[in-house]
Image: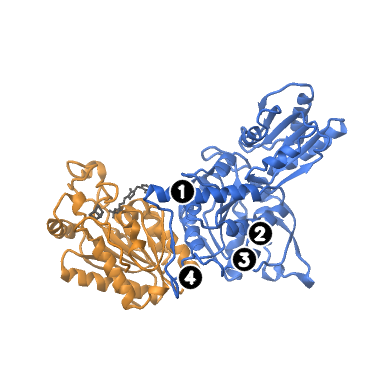
Chain colours: A blue, B orange
């Protein structure tokens, strides 16, 4: 997992040839890096941790080439606070980490959300808890969607399922962050981060940063700008909280995305995101061959959870099966969404183990036969 | 400075230090090019008093914010204002690494040997034997260790360009303090590297002393342990 790549692309490689979009074979982690640069991000602050290292490694040479700054911070705590400073100065800024590092960033993420600063944070998940392991996991769902930090705040959470989506969602993340002035988290996992797939990059965006009138850039020709999250007067703080909640409410209405596969006639619907969804697809095809009516619902926004889209997809469904690389976290959002109307089953692997299509298929078969309940291998 | 009334206790020297920073900014005519970073501590409301762009940091993280701001806006002046709990305890990693990187920012470090805002607990800079709410019979070196001399420590780092310690216990020293602040800001303006001025300051409320007694206590107890002077001046400064 830790190796030096010598075949790194060089600056000339990024040019669109004859105006057509650039197509490259890339690791998911690198695709995020290239997409960030193309989304107008020029600042990265981070601290090494497996399995996301290819992203900072890529940006360590790519950003200076693009006239930007790559800075390895002394810790994840420092990194997220550098992100705060840069975001407050009006820049598009990125940081990335994996579980333990994201835990350290939570105080900063709460401050960013409280001060309404936009930024993009990448978590390439590994197995936990504690130091856990370096193999892929999905057990940071609670941390990502509930916010591991203090106070009533939310982060938008996007879950890519391919290298192409790693790139596409990076663009999208920067747009959402600026639009709502809030941190946006890209929640990937070690498999997506490390695997190589072809990826097409749209041409470089012209990020308009001139409209950040609130940024602290020196008060030339205007009143001073203050970026803060402190309100010592409880009435004022409640007002600020109401304002934030209204914004979160708006995001819940406007940012909902999911993908469906063969759900129209499905009696059993699998619900999975990221790499678990990809493995589930293979299990669904195999089950269909055996005549079992199965489909897949893949949440793409994890917060807001695409509850409405899910409920619209359940016309023929009799049972739901949530597949995660955790002991069962997203399943809570599914249960909240269906509110007891359907039985919700679970299949999960933990510790860095990937569920196999075969395992999922046999779980589907047990459901066909009416067996129920939770299973974690 | 704005017209806001200070929220500080009577005799607290934070106010004097605010004034000095504001005067240096005005004299250098950099008000519209300066971004300040406020700490968590008694001076958390610094942005109510300085009439400039400011960001408020999490406890101890001001140097990291300042780094982020300065990297985006390298031609602006960026400074942090931090207490001793903020800079010398929870934020030691951030200040050390900002200095080690030679980050072209200025830290205004207010050392009052106690945690003011939270009600007078022991700080990393609390003197041996000094009574606080968490060391009622005086700081016990055996169990609580020794007070930290940040200026001396940071001066050992190659990235530090200008480091000095001053005091504000009398008018003569206040004038010296202002000169040091000016030198630190000039160091940044000329792009030479990291600069910090440590200002020995009083906390009459939590020291349990009258303002004049506090100034005397500072002079008699703090200066012997925290000697004044310039600890690092890069040749270019
Ligand atoms: C993470 C975190 N821990 C603790 C606190 C509580 N806290 C607020 S101010 C402070 C100490 C400030 O002392 P100092 O930096 O010496 O500044 P002073 O108030 O003396 O000027 C502490 C511990 C906090 N706000 N955040
Ligand atoms: S508690 Fe101490 S440091 Fe804080 S305002 Fe009062 S005197 Fe100043």
Residue A107 badge: 1
**Does residue A268 appear anywhere in the picture?**
yes
Query: Mark 4: which secondary structure?
Result: loop
Using the image, name the chain to which the residue with label 2 belongs: A
Q: CA distance from mark 3 to mark 1?
A: 26 Å
Please give the name of the residue rendered at 72% of the width and 63% of the height, measured from the top-left corner: A202
Nearer to us in this view, A50 or B201: B201
Query: Mark 3: which secondary structure?
Result: loop
Sooner in the amino-acid sequence: mark 3 or mark 2: 3
Sooner in the amino-acid sequence: mark 3 or mark 1: 3
Q: Relative to residue B77, is residue A259 drawn left or right?
A: right
**Residue identifier under label 3:** A40
**Residue identifier under label 4:** B73
Height in image: A285 above or below B71? above
Check chain identity for marks 3 and 2: say if they share one. yes
**Residue identifier under label 2:** A171
Check chain identity for marks 1 and 2: say if they share one. yes
Q: Relative to residue B202, is residue A266 drawn left or right?
A: right
Label 4, ligand 1: CB separation under 8 Å? no
Q: CA distance from mark 3 to mark 2?
A: 9 Å
Q: Relative to residue B222, is residue A305 drawn left or right?
A: right
The image quarter in which residue A279 lies: top right
Q: CA distance from mark 4 to mark 1?
A: 25 Å
Q: CA distance from mark 4 to mark 2?
A: 24 Å
Q: Residues within 10 Å of mark 2 (few under 14, many from 20)?
A: many
Q: CA distance from mark 3 to mark 4?
A: 16 Å
């Amino acid at each position: 997992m830790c190796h030096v790549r010598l075949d790194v692309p060089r600056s000339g490689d990024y040019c669109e040839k004859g105006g057509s979009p650039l197509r490259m074979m890339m690791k998911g982690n690198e695709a995020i890096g290239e997409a960030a640069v193309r989304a107008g991000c020029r600042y990265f602050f981070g601290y090494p941790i497996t399995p996301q290292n290819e992203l900072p490694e890529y940006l360590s040479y790519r950003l200076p080439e693009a006239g930007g700054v790559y800075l390895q911070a002394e810790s994840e705590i420092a990194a997220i606070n550098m992100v705060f400073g840069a975001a407050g100065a009006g820049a598009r800024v990125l940081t990335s980490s994996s579980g333990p590092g994201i835990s350290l960033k939570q105080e900063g993420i709460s401050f960013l959300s409280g001060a309404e600063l936009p930024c993009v944070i990448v978590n390439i998940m590994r197995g936990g808890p504690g130091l856990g392991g370096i193999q892929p996991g999905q057990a940071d769902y609670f941390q990502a969607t509930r916010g591991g930090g203090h106070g009533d705040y939310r982060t938008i959470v996007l879950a890519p399922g391919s290298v192409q989506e790693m790139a596409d969602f990076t663009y999208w993340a920067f747009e959402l962050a600026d639009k709502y002035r809030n941190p946006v988290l890209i929640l990937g996992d070690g498999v997506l981060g490390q695997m190589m797939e072809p990826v097409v990059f749209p041409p470089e965006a012209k990020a308009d940063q001139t409209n950040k009138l609130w940024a602290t850039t020196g008060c030339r020709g205007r009143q001073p700008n203050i970026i803060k999250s402190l309100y010592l007067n409880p009435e004022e703080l409640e007002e600020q909280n109401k304002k934030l909640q209204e914004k979160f409410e708006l995001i819940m209405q406007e940012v909902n995305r999911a993908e469906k596969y063969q759900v129209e006639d499905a009696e059993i619907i699998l619900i999975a995101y990221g790499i678990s969804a990809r493995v589930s697809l293979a299990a669904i095809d195999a089950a269909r061959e055996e005549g079992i009516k199965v489909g897949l619902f893949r949440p793409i926004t994890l917060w807001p959870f695409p509850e409405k889209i899910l409920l619209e997809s359940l016309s023929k469904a009799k049972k739901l099966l949530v597949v995660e690389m955790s002991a069962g976290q997203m399943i809570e959002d599914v249960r909240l969404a269906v509110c007891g109307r359907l039985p919700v089953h679970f299949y999960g692997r933990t510790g860095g183990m990937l569920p196999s299509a075969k395992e999922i298929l046999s779980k589907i078969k047990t459901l066909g036969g009416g067996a129920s309940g939770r299973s974690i291998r | 400075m704005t017209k806001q009334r200070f929220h500080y206790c009577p005799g607290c020297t934070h106010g004097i230090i605010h004034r000095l920073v504001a005067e240096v900014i005005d004299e250098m005519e950099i008000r519209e090019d300066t971004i300040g970073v406020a700490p968590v501590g008694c001076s958390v409301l610094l942005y109510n008093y300085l009439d400039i762009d400011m960001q408020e940091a999490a406890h101890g993280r001001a140097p990291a914010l300042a780094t982020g701001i300065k990297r985006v806006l390298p031609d602006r002046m960026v400074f942090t204002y931090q207490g001793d709990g903020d800079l010398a305890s929870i934020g030691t990693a951030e200040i050390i690494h900002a200095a080690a990187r030679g980050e072209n920012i200025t830290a205004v470090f207010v050392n009052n040997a106690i945690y003011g805002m939270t009600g007078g607990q022991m700080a990393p800079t609390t003197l041996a034997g000094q009574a606080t709410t968490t060391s009622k019979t005086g700081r016990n070196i055996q169990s609580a260790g020794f007070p930290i001399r940040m200026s001396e420590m940071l001066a050992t780092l190659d990235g530090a360009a200008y480091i000095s310690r001053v005091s504000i216990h009398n008018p003569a020293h206040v004038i010296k303090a202002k000169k040091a602040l000016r030198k630190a800001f000039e160091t940044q303006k000329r792009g030479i590297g990291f600069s910090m001025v440590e200002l020995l300051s009083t906390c009459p409320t939590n020291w349990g002393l009258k303002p004049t007694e506090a100034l005397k206590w500072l002079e008699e107890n703090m200066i012997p342990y925290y000697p004044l002077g310039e600890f690092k001046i890069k040749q270019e400064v």
